Image (cartoon, helix red, strand yellow):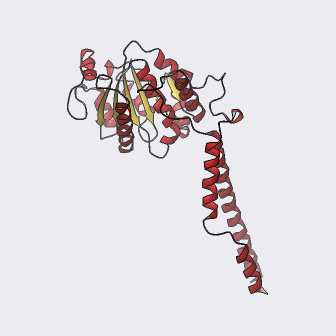
Amino acid sequence: MSEARRGVGRGRRLPRGILPLALIAALAIAWLVPQLPFLSLGGGAESTLGDDLHVAIGSLPDQPNVIVDMDPDLGTYPEIRYATRAALADLMAVGSRVAVVSFSTEGRAIAVAEIARLRAAGAGPDRLVDLGFRSGGEAALVQLTGQPLDRDVSGATSPVLDQLQERGGGLGAFDLALVVGGGDMGPRSWIEQVEPRVPHLPVAAITPTFLLPQVQPYREAGQLVALAGTLPEAVAYGASVAGGGATSGPERVPEQPPNALAILVGMLVALAVLLESGMSGLVGGLRGASRGRRG
């Protein structure tokens, strides 16, 4: 009888690999479904999410100098990639001269890709300069505050760097620092290490949601002039830039915002897996305890 029951159980078992394929299919369908208004990540048409970053960039002087610290980590960058690319397009749209620097290896890898994308879209040496990777973390950031920026990653000069030299050459020559953080290097490092040394440099930031408890106090104290620190803020900001931006060139936001339905499906599946795993452990523990009492 026992063998017969096991045979029936084996007959009803799902083919191996069907569940992962079903998950991929569900996510693909959710991604293809148009954005649903009641699942909007950006807060709707009347939302003011992300406005402070749009205002901070829009209020820069003519042809401003902006340094972008590109130091997100690979694990959380997908959450803020849309907002980051929107911010780079926003900066290009207002005529900024942009210098990109990184203090982490992951940030440098992402910076290389974003710089290549902007250059392919038409951002020339008069608009974009690569300051490269500075090893040493916060120590390198402190060192940067006292250095003249007169060479790019290849050791060459550029029109952007020449213009910076006319204004002193260091971080004080910039009108804004945009910090794209996610790991060890982020807004906290700039507020604690750069602001005391370069007090007139405004700092804005784009960070993943898990850093919000760390960066929100800086925003409330006014030490961050703008912050996109949650997914709804990032999506709302990116959507506002895309809505008024160019259709080509470095001023164009190059991708669509995250799909809320796909995110919801993924979250529900993750919760289901966690629940199933927890229940399996609980049931296994109860069975073990029952066997122990019988023994």
Query: Residue 142 at x, y = what percent?
Result: 32, 31
Query: Taking 18 as reference, is 226 above or below it?
Result: above
Residue 257 x/y as whole percent: 56, 35
215 is higher (above) or lower (below) than 291: above
Compared to residue 210, the image places residue 94 above or below, namely above
Nearer to us in this view, 159 or 172: 159
Q: Is residue 289 left or right of residue 234?
A: right
Residue at x 44%, y 43% (from the top left corner): 73
- The single residue placed furthest to the right in the displayed view is 1
- Asked whether residue 159 is in view, the answer is yes
Q: Assign the N terminus to one quadrant of the image.
A: bottom right
Whether residue 263 is visible: no
Q: Is residue 285 left or right of residue 237?
A: right
Residue placed most toward the observer, 23 or 78: 23
The extreme top residue here reads 62
Could you say which quadrant of the image residue 260 lies in? top right
**Which of the 4 image quarters holds residue 97?**
top left
Q: Is residue 14 above or below residue 53?
A: below
Q: Is residue 81 left or right of residue 190?
A: right
Viewer-proximal residue, 266 or 53?
266
Give the x, y percent position of residue 238.
Answer: 53, 29
- Residue at x 46% of width, y 23% of height: 90
Q: Quadrant of the C terminus?
A: bottom right
Q: Nearer the viewer, residue 146 or 70?
A: 70
Q: Residue at x 73, y 81 (%)?
A: 7
- Residue at 25% x, 34% y: name it: 153
View extreme (front): residue: 248
Residue 282 in the image: x percent, y percent?
71, 65
